[in-house]
Image (cartoon, rainbow, N blue to C red):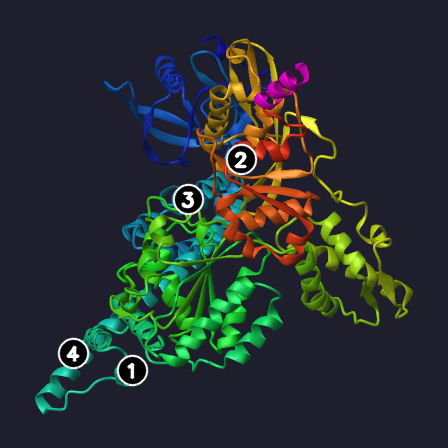
Amino acid sequence: MAILKKSDKLGKKVLPALPLRDLIIFPNMVVPLLVGRVRSINTVEEALASEEELLVVFQKEPQIEDPELKDVYSVGVKTKVIQSVREQSGLMKILVEVLDRAVIKDFFKDKKIFAAKIENVVEKEAEASNKENQALSRLALEMLDKYLNLNTSVPRELYTTISTIENPARLCDAIAGYLPLKLKDKGALIEKIETGERLRLLIDILNQEIGLLEIQKKIQNQVIKKIEDNQRQYFLSEQLKEIQKELGKEGESDEISQLREKIKKAKMSPVAETKAMEELTRLSKTMPLSPEATVIRTYLEWLINLPWDSKTEDNLDIAHAAKVLDEDHYGLEKVKERILEYLSVRKRSEGMKSPILCFVGPPGVGKTSLGKSIARAMGRKFVRVSLGGMRDEAEIRGHRKTYIGSLPGRIIQSIRKAGVKNPVFLLDEIDKLGQDFRGDPASALLEVLDPEQNHSFSDHYLEVEFDLSYVLFITTANTEYTIPPALLDRMEIISLPGYTIWEKKEIAQRHLIPKQLKEHGLTEKNIKFSEDALFKIIRNYTREAGVRNLEREIANICRKVTKKIVETDKEGFYRITAKSLENYLGPEKFSTPSGEKEHKVGVATGMAWTEYGGEILFTEVLTMKGKGNLILTGHLGEVMKESAQAALSYVRAHINDFGLDPDFYKEIDIHIHVPEGAIPKDGPSAGVTIATSLISCLTGKPVNAEIAMTGEITLQGKVLKIGGLKSKILAAHRSGIKKVIIPQENEKDLKEIPTKVKEDLEIIMVKNIREVIENSIIGWKTIKEEKNGRDSSGK
């Protein structure tokens, strides 16, 4: 072929070249090869046809399909094909005799074959008789002997065969060719032309392999010895048991005796003690180092360390409890009253079951810290478990102890951590429980939070009942709507709707400021907040139901004051006033009144409840030419959309009262929009707001901007009771509203509204939408009154 006709002026020969992927062969070997690449098969056939020697080259990376000069080692071997067989699968088997090395000067290919330009390597006769090489050969044979003694996978007969070779070069190639060395090491050996260098490299490689084999053998011996020791210990243990049984002195180990003593002292329930003794008997018959023994030992430790009979004595002093609760929290009278009632009953009756309290309120109102205060007031230990994002039922009930690494659930873990059977146990964020294929944690909590069932709570890991009836469980949530009904039914809901601005001011003065002064290394001699400054922070720098952001702003001021003191190195006094606030906190984040300032047609102010407290929202209505479509926007929920439909139906049913054309809706489209469209809104309490803004738009009469309203509307025009009244009225008060319209049925809820808020607001109670319109739409008169007025003036 044309590629094989290439020659060099220096006489360098071009031979067909067969690249091998993961094999390196050495001179004086006869080796079978399996050829698979089409170009490689063509190369072999070309060598057979031209009766040329076949050059075998070796790839550095086996995965390369079409190697180039840089991809092969610089030295290959010339071979003679002794035999070749073509299989049905398309592969070719050949038997080659390896002749000698050849230096590869160039490597190329065409569409059919590989070829290489080579330079023959001539072995120098003097190297064979070189004394240094003879000495290296003997050392290589010694290393080979040691290697074969350690590596039993290589037949020992190999040493006998190789030791008869006298030529140092052939000896080195034979050892390298027949031992299972790394491909990289063989590649380095094939490239060594000079015999002495090749022998030295081989000795280094054998020395490294012998070192690895010695470490491997040492590890293997250690494993075997450990197994033998375990077997010996087992046999001796069994023999000892039989001897003791024959002598009538059957005994037990110190560990078993200690565990038995601990079980008796733990004061477990009879069922739990029986179970523990059964497991102890199993442990005594199990090998100490077996995995099963570890599982049993861990299980017994859990049973022993649980507080089966350990509890703290309750402090039932009502005056002390009231003092502690007042020290830690300002306001929250309803919660404090409930705790004092519980303590009073406990003082009179020991058999009362602990209540399951659920504090529901927006973030930052003190739900979690209230649990700590209750524990301190009663003299009990306090433990807390966060349920937010929990999706696995096993987090509550635990895993079966058969699983590796299994543990009891969070309830039992926390009881053990408390060390007593009657702690105050806070289950935080119970409204944020999840569920997936691993189970429903909320369902697992049904037993925990039921006073009729939790005296026999069963954890999957313990497999025995544990009494939780002495535990005072307190749960917290931002909203009760996402709590499953069955779970909600087991709890006593106590609402914490949020604080008024006066309550926030008191909390800041009594708790937040002293806490931040201590944390920032300040005293009252360094900084003082005026009341005006606190009110301004509450109104213009925070907008929340709780006090979390208020505390952050106070901390922000304290940091800046601390920085000034450190910079000046002087203990100065800083008075924080309303005027100086901007220097510390920057521009106001919120304007004082956030309600509408002017009366507008088609715009009414409503009051809404969210998980983060009350808010005011506006409802806007516009009409335009159309075909009677009702357009609803503002990310409204299904219930709110139905309220809009009900309001429109009421207006159409009472067109005579509003002076509207009977077919007014046929020629216009009505668009109802609630601003802040990115925030989802839902609930029936916006019914009266939607109806008022709709009637205002259709009649052209403006709505009083100083009035906010809430209430559900029916098709008959009745205004029904709503929830979250306190939060809504507090939000209206914060926003500068002067009057609020609420359903008549909510009159009893006004007792919860702070007196100062009621003094600032005019609260109007209504039974139907007509009363809402008369009190909210400016200049409102019914059509009949206007008609009667015109008739009177005509006469």
Q: Earlier in the sequence, mark 4 or mark 3?
A: 3
Q: Separation of disc 1 and disc 2 at Cα?
A: 59 Å
**Three-letter residue code for mark 2:** Ala
**Three-letter residue code for mark 4:** Glu
Give the residue at mark 4.
238
Q: Separation of disc 1 and disc 3 at Cα?
A: 73 Å
Tag 1's secondary structure? loop
**Three-letter residue code for mark 3:** Ala
Give the residue at mark 2.
686
Percent across and percent down for residue 564 are 86, 61
Q: Are marks 1 and 2 in contact (CB under 8 Å)?
A: no
Tag 3's secondary structure? helix
Give the residue at mark 1.
267
Quadrant in which the N terminus is drawn: top left
Residue 50, compared with residue 344, is above or below; it is above
**Three-letter residue code for mark 1:** Lys
Specify whether residue 479 is painted magenta.
Answer: no
Most foreground residue, 615 or 612: 615
Residue 257, compared with residue 417, is above or below; it is below
Crowd rating for badge 2 (residues with CA inside 10 Å; few <14, some 14–19, many 20+):
many
Give the residue at mark 3.
176
Q: Earlier in the sequence, mark 1 or mark 2?
A: 1
Q: Nearer the viewer, mark 4 or mark 2?
A: 2
Magenta-highlighted residues: 783-795
Crowd rating for badge 4 (residues with CA inside 10 Å; few <14, some 14–19, many 20+):
few
Residue 285 placement, left or right of 106 = left
Percent across and percent down for residue 562 are 81, 64
Q: Separation of disc 2 and disc 3 at Cα?
A: 90 Å
User: Would you say residue 683 is visible in this rendering?
Assistant: no
